[in-house]
């Protein structure tokens, strides 16, 4: 049984000005220990999708349709109490901005104690302290700093602390939402390597949410590409790299700078992401698509199996 | 009378359009409705009052609300209904006058000091902050005690206390706008300081001033009532809700609750009306950002 | 910046403000009307009597000299002499002050507690009918004149239900609490609730509370609106912050999140607001004390107004101003101490 199964998930934001469909009929599955890369521009719905997996979509967001099954159980049917016992323990989340994700008035140690205490109330103080220090060490933070406050650490270190909190209770699934976007390039690589080594040690499944396709090409088993709330391509990482089908994916790949090419022309995808209050009719990508056909203006393309384990949402491959 | 009618006539469609702007719009409309009704009531008092509010012994003293005197009578045998109709006049005059003084003094000083910056700004801010830090009622009492009774003196006392509020809001707005790019652009294009102030900055400051003014109206009314309560209001022969409350105090043990209840209620409604307008306008002009 | 340097800077800032404040009061009382003595007597006295008073109060000296003496006197703690009997205004103020202090403390407690509880509750159900009702409650309460609310309470609870007394600070037949006597050392704060506990007299303590109840409830209710609004908006803002969502993502209990994360960060502005509201509270105390015949500074000022005792009024106003400046200084320093970002 897969660890995670998402079936036809749809999430809306009910704002005063209108309804925004941030996630539109997205399905995916993830086995134990697998890595999934969730790629898209801002506004593509990837963060909303990530937050839905732990049922923390912020107001005014509402999950309007679909199923999210973890180890077979649909979490959308769980009571809040039960959901809370999953969060932080079975499924954990790493947020994008390390500068604002820690409580400024609590020491780092207190963050850990709280976490451990909430999920394992019988644990002794010494045991909890030992665990906290061990994990801090694992992520490369000196355990003596356990009594420092968040503002005494740099951005990269704070992200490590966040990661430490996310793996402290040995979760089955870690969702990392743009874990490196707020950091500079050198630190980025270190953090990603850290995540990889932790995965090797602890064996948890990982969902890596990012706008940067290059990050996930080598580090993830599977990749989902999202655009304007729609799933546009879903394949094993190797297949996606070798044979990208969706024009958007192709555009993303072309725009990755390659240091080995002497005179590479950086190609950006023309145009900009659509206004989700008034998305274009038909395929949401057609205004920027070099292959747009007449049918793309009027009908939404269905999801098509181009080969086993490779899905695309595009009329180029059928469905007309 | 004619000017008043035309003002009202143009207000009504404006208010009607506000109802389309959601909850905040409705709050503004309700508040305006309350204020307008009370103002109308006060203006029309001479025509709608069954008795002369100052005339004593028009009926038996201390009579509870009944058919002939719907709101009862007080210790002087005066009709409470008539007193309620006319009692807001002083308060409204005082509030309006003090608002006018505040606008005339606070806004220009605020504009000049914050736009000019430097020493002028520092000195003005220091003075204004000192006044602002002072307990409002205490300062008003001190000034009113010195100046004496009467509408003008009350208005001045209240105006002094609230000028800093106007100054501060104008200043904070000006400082923000001053830094925005389009004022830089204007300056680069060679516009004179005065032009910039009047054409660029002032129009953007006006909405905030309106909001502060409405809230201050409410405060002014409550402060005026407070001044009257401690004996620093107008002469006693003018019907005033504040006086009714003060006099009514002595009557409480005898159980004559109606003498204070209705005038008190009117003060609450009037202050509430202005507060609602302020709340509604503030929300409309600076909507809280949703995701 | 460091706590120490912050304190020094803050205290230095207070000095010019206090100077300005004192000067303003001086201007208002001595310069505005022209002649406070004339006003006092309202032209119903002989020129000799007026001159005599002027001399006794030092009001016949040239204005700059008066200003200097006024400031010098304040440094000594001399707040002037009453026009009524030439006794020390400072003395009168100090004996009336504890009553006002007690009232202010309890009213602030009511306002803050109600404000925080209702504000947090409102923020947790954003945009719901409960949220709107709580906000409406705060707004309406502020629109009620303090003395009106006080009188309503007197009618309902004092005269109608007879649960609480309608005035004064202690039962007229009872002796006020005198505090603790340790041999030759006498400890008393002037606060009846504290002194009665020091004395070990529970009955007096309960009585003191009974008399405090209506006045502090009145003043506290009227001013809780500010705290409701502040707490609510701070909580809403903080509840939306990343670290709160991150805490939720770790499965922490809602209570821990709301109070341990959101509230602790939202609380500090409440503290500052308490300092700001202190001034408003003092103003409100004047009206409350008059309504409930509470023997404090507020009632003292009103009495002095009736007597046209201008020097006393001036002294009391100065005292109020200094008190407010002191409280806001203390609150600012406390805030700096509590926020670890400034402290370290």
Image (cartoon, coloured by chain):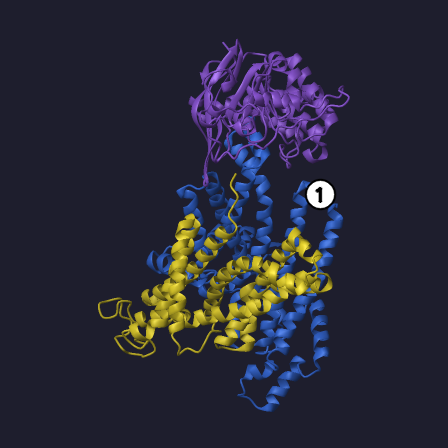
Chain colours: A purple, B yellow, C blue
Badge 1 density bin: few <14, some 14–19, many ≥20, Cα 10 Å = some
Instruction: Give the side of residue C91 with respect to residue B19, left or right.
Output: right
Residue for point 40% across, 70% down? B4
The spot of residue B45 in percent (x, y) is 33, 72
The spot of residue A290 in percent (x, y) is 57, 25
Q: Residue furthest left?
A: B67
Q: Residue furthest right?
A: A262
Secondary structure of the residue carrying tag 1 is: helix
From the viewer's side, name the closer residue of C302 and A245.
A245
- In the picture, residue A217 is in which quadrant? top right
- In the picture, residue B88 is in which quadrant? bottom left
Compared to B96, does B205 lie above or below?
above
From the viewer's side, name the closer residue of A219 and B70.
A219
The chain ID associated with circle 1 is C
The spot of residue A243 in percent (x, y) is 61, 13
Give the residue number, with chain letter if any, for mark 1: C343
Compared to C37, does B161 lie above or below?
above
Compared to C20, does A269 lie above or below?
above
Instruction: Give the side of residue A81 with respect to residue A200, left or right.
Output: left
- In the picture, residue B74 is in which quadrant? bottom left
The spot of residue B154 in percent (x, y) is 51, 73
**Residue A126 showing in the rendered view:** no
**Residue C284 showing in the rendered view:** yes
In the rendered view of the protein, which quadrant contains the C terminus of chain A?
top left
From the viewer's side, name the closer residue of B1 and B67.
B1
């Amino acid at each position: 049984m897969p660890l995670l199964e998402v079936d036809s998930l749809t999430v809306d934001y009910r704002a005063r000005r209108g309804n925004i469909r941030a996630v539109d009929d997205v399905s995916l599955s993830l086995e134990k220990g697998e890595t999934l890369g969730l790629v898209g521009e801002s506004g593509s719905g990837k963060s909303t999708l990530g937050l839905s997996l732990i049922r923390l979509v912020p107001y005014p967001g509402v999950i309007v349709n679909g199923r999210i099954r973890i180890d077979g159980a649909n979490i959308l049917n769980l009571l809040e109490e039960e959901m809370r016992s999953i969060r932080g323990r079975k499924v954990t989340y790493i947020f994008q901005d390390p500068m604002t994700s820690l409580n400024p008035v609590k020491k780092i140690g207190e963050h850990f104690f709280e976490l451990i205490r909430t999920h394992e109330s019988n644990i002794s103080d010494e045991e909890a302290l030992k665990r906290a220090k061990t994990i801090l060490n694992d992520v490369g933070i000196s355990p003596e700093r356990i009594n420092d406050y968040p503002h005494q650490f740099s951005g990269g270190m704070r992200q490590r602390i966040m990661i430490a909190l996310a793996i402290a209770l040995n979760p089955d699934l870690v969702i990392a939402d743009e874990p490196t976007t707020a950091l500079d390039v050198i630190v980025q690589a270190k953090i990603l390597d850290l995540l990889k080594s932790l995965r090797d040690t602890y064996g948890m499944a990982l969902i890596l949410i990012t706008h940067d396709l290059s990050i996930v090409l080598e580090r993830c088993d599977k990749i989902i590409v999202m655009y304007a709330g729609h799933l546009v391509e879903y394949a094993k990482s190797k297949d996606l790299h070798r044979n990208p089908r969706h024009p958007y994916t192709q555009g993303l790949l072309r725009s990755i700078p390659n240091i080995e090419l002497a005179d590479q022309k950086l190609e950006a995808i023309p145009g900009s992401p659509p206004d989700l209050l008034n998305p274009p009719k038909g395929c949401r990508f057609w205004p920027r698509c070099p292959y747009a056909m007449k049918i793309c203006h009027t009908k939404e393309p269905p999801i098509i199996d181009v080969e086993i384990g490779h899905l695309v949402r595009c009329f180029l491959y059928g469905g007309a | 009378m004619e000017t008043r009618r035309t003002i009202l006539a143009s207000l009504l469609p404006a208010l009607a359009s506000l109802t389309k702007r959601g909850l905040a719009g409705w709050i503004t409309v309700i508040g305006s409705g309350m204020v307008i009704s009370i103002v109308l009531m006060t203006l029309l008092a001479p025509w709608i009052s069954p008795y002369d509010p100052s005339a004593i012994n028009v009926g038996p003293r201390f009579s509870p609300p009944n058919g002939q005197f719907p709101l009862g009578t007080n210790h002087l045998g005066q009709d409470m209904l008539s007193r309620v109709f006319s009692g807001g006049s002083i308060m409204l005059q005082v509030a309006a006058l003090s608002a006018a003084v505040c606008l005339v003094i606070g806004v220009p000083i605020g504009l000049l000091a914050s736009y000019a910056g430097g020493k002028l700004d520092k000195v003005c801010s220091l003075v204004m902050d000192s006044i602002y830090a002072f307990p409002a009622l205490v300062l008003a009492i001190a000034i009113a005690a010195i100046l004496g009774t009467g509408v003008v003196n009350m208005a001045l006392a209240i105006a002094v206390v609230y000028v800093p509020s106007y100054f501060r809001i104008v200043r904070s707005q000006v400082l923000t706008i001053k830094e925005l790019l389009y004022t830089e652009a204007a300056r680069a294009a060679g516009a004179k300081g005065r032009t910039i102030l009047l054409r660029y900055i002032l129009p953007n400051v006006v909405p905030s001033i309106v909001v502060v003014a409405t809230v201050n109206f409410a405060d002014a009314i409550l402060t005026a009532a407070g001044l009257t309560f401690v004996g620093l209001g107008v002469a006693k022969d003018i019907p005033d809700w504040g006086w009714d409350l003060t006099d009514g105090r002595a009557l409480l043990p005898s159980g004559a609750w109606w003498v204070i209840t209705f005038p008190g209620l009117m003060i609450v409604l009037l202050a509430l009306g202005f507060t609602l307008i302020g709340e509604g306008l503030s929300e409309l002009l600076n909507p809280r950002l949703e995701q | 910046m460091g706590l120490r340097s912050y304190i020094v800077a803050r205290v230095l800032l207070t000095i010019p403000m206090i100077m300005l404040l004192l000067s303003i009061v001086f201007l208002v009382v001595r310069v505005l009307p022209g002649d406070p003595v004339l006003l006092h007597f309202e032209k119903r006295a002989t020129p000799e009597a007026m001159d005599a008073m002027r001399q006794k109060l030092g009001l016949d000296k040239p204005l700059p000299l008066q200003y200097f003496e006024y400031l010098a006197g304040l440094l000594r703690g001399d707040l002037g002499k009453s026009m009524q009997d030439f006794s020390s205004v400072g003395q009168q103020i100090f004996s009336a002050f504890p009553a006002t202090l007690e009232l202010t403390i309890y009213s602030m407690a009511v306002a803050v507690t109600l404000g925080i509880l209702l504000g947090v509750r409102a923020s947790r159900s954003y945009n719901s009918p409960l949220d709107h009702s709580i906000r409406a409650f705060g707004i309406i309460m502020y629109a009620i004149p303090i003395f009106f609310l006080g009188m309503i309470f007197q009618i309902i609870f004092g005269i109608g239900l007879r649960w609480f007394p309608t005035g004064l600070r202690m039962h007229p037949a009872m002796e006020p609490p005198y505090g603790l006597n340790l041999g030759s050392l006498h400890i008393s704060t002037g606060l009846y609730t504290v002194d009665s506990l020091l004395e070990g007299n529970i009955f007096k303590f309960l009585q003191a509370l009974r008399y405090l109840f209506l006045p502090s409830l009145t003043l506290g209710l009227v001013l809780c609106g500010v705290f409701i609004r502040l707490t609510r908006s701070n909580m809403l803002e903080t509840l939306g912050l990343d670290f709160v969502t991150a805490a939720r993502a770790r499965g922490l209990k809602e209570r821990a999140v709301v109070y341990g994360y959101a509230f602790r960060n939202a609380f500090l502005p409440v503290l500052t607001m308490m300092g700001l509201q202190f001034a408003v509270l003092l103003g409100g105390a004047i009206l409350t004390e008059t309504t409930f015949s509470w023997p404090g500074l507020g009632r003292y000022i009103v009495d002095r107004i009736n007597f046209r005792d201008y020097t006393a009024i001036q002294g009391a106003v100065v005292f109020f101003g200094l008190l407010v400046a002191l409280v806001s200084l203390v609150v600012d320093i406390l805030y700096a101490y509590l926020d670890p970002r400034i402290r370290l």
